[in-house]
Amino acid sequence: MATVLEDVGRETIEQLDYVGSLNIQLWSTIRAMKCALPLVGNRYRWQATMRQALQVGYDALPIVSLMALCAGFILAMQGATELRRFGAQEYVINLVVIAFTRELGPLLTATTVSARSGSAFAAEIGTMKVSEELDSLRVMALEPVEFVLAPKYLATLISVPCLTVVCSLFGIIAGGLFMFFSSQLSPSFYFRYVLESMLLRDVVAGVVKSIAFATIIAHVSCLEGFRVRGGPDSVGRSATSAVVKSTFLVILADAIFTAVFYLTGAH
Amino acid sequence: MPIISVSDLVVEYDGRRILNKLNLEVEAGETMVLLGGSGSGKSTLLRQIMGLERPKSGSVVIKGADITTCSSSELKKVRRSMGVAFQSGALFNSLTVEENVALPLREHTALAPSIIDLMVWLKLAVVGLADFGKLYPQALSGGMRKRGAVARALSLDPEILILDEPSAGLDPIVAAELDEVILLLKQTFQMTVIVVTHEMASAFRIADRIAMLYQGSFSLIGTKEEIKASRNPRVRQFLDRVPEDITNPVAVSTYFQKYLERKEAFL
């Protein structure tokens, strides 16, 4: 019994320590972010931010677009199968638009970025830690939070909402392709219906979610990198842990957002 | 007044005492060599002098500031007067050698890029890497990486130069060249140099004083002559390269007893 209590207590303390570390890291990054901004900040940090934004955003465009096309097509097909029974096939358009702007766009993008860039952040920072690069930054009187984390966070904040918009767009295009091939609905009619069923508040909610997801991915992944101890094997473990934890927290955050929107009637 | 003063320094990891009430004073312009076996606490002492870790008790005063208690801005000020070359080199793999050396200049000075280029070339020339500045660290040999790290440590013309095992893993010719570079720096710029090394020849070539660490305490601190003439058994063992007697019957029976105890505990 005592052992069980000890284990529960130790695990609770570890989780609280993790949450505390995430909070401290978030606030110190926000304080350091002005250095990564254009014009007012350090131009080398801004250059680093742009490089990171290209890696997180631009390089992920093909895979995010392809996944959105597939998911949009699947959603439209599954929806049409059920809605056809009630003679409501035209509602497939509403289904695709609402699903992508509110949920699938932000969620698909976040999971992709978590797998691609979250693991890369953790591995990069972890390698810097085991090869003493972070220590050498400190002894050069440079803050790793400002030098490494702030550009990554800002780049993720820029890229993830942009990718979310692209993801939603490709999902909706996939719905249009399905409707064209299954019901010969012309693209112009389809996009007119899309604009009618798309609500600004849904788009805003999707972008707000994507900003929150970007924060989760950047901070969880970087913290996993900073917590690396030991040799190269722990770098691999930190990359895996970054993907698992950030994906889980993204889905948890999505559930909380959806519950809040549902209860407040924002949807 | 010493430029570095370590007083009653105690460092513990997980309850295990690594440094036990160390006292050390390094005068300005002096070359202090830290000698000692693996695990004797040399690198831990260096990390304390760099302000990378906080001790359990004691103080490390550098240029009048106690870096164990001072504010982060004071610590940064002290660090700007230090140049450190880590054991692994710790050059940033994402930057070329030139960019590595230019980094502290870019970050801490307002010099024009053309001046920075010239200074970088000079630093690289001092360590014999003037023709290799455009290469990335991965493309360099171990010895060249270490020399690159020394060039970066020199970039801000520091008052204190800290070198962690600069000649480990280098061939005797390159190691001797590095010794000459250290002597040149000392003569030309009156730098205070702290070197951790296992190489006896190198230590006796460059040192003004030598501090011998054994199990977290200093066995002896003295000039080269005092060290050579010492009768201290640990110093003599180190200088005469006498191995620990692992075939001693008492030692063997102790190991065997420990093994049996562990096995019983496991079963």
Image (cartoon, coloured by chain):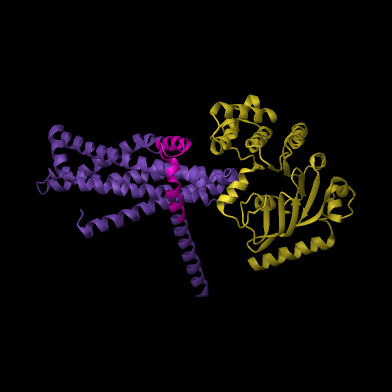
Chain colours: A purple, B yellow
Q: Residue at x 41, y 51 (%)?
A: A246
Where is residue B57 shown, x and y percent of the image?
Answer: 66, 62
Q: Is residue A58 magenta?
A: no
Q: Quadrant of residue B232?
A: bottom right
Q: Nearer the viewer, residue A245 or B157?
A: B157
Where is residue B240 shown, x and y percent of the image?
Answer: 86, 47
For the question of whether residue A230 can be seen, the reply is no
Q: Quadrant of residue B193?
A: top right
Q: Nearer the viewer, residue A183 or A167?
A: A167
The magenta stretch is: A24-53
Reply above or below: B32 against A252: above
Reply above or below: B96 against A264: above
Q: Is residue A32 magenta?
A: yes
Reply above or below: B261 against A140: below
Taking the image as shown, residue A132 lies to the left or right of residue A197, namely right
Q: Quadrant of residue A194?
A: top left
Taking the image as shown, residue B69 lies to the left or right of residue B202, namely left
For the question of whether residue B104 can be seen, the reply is yes
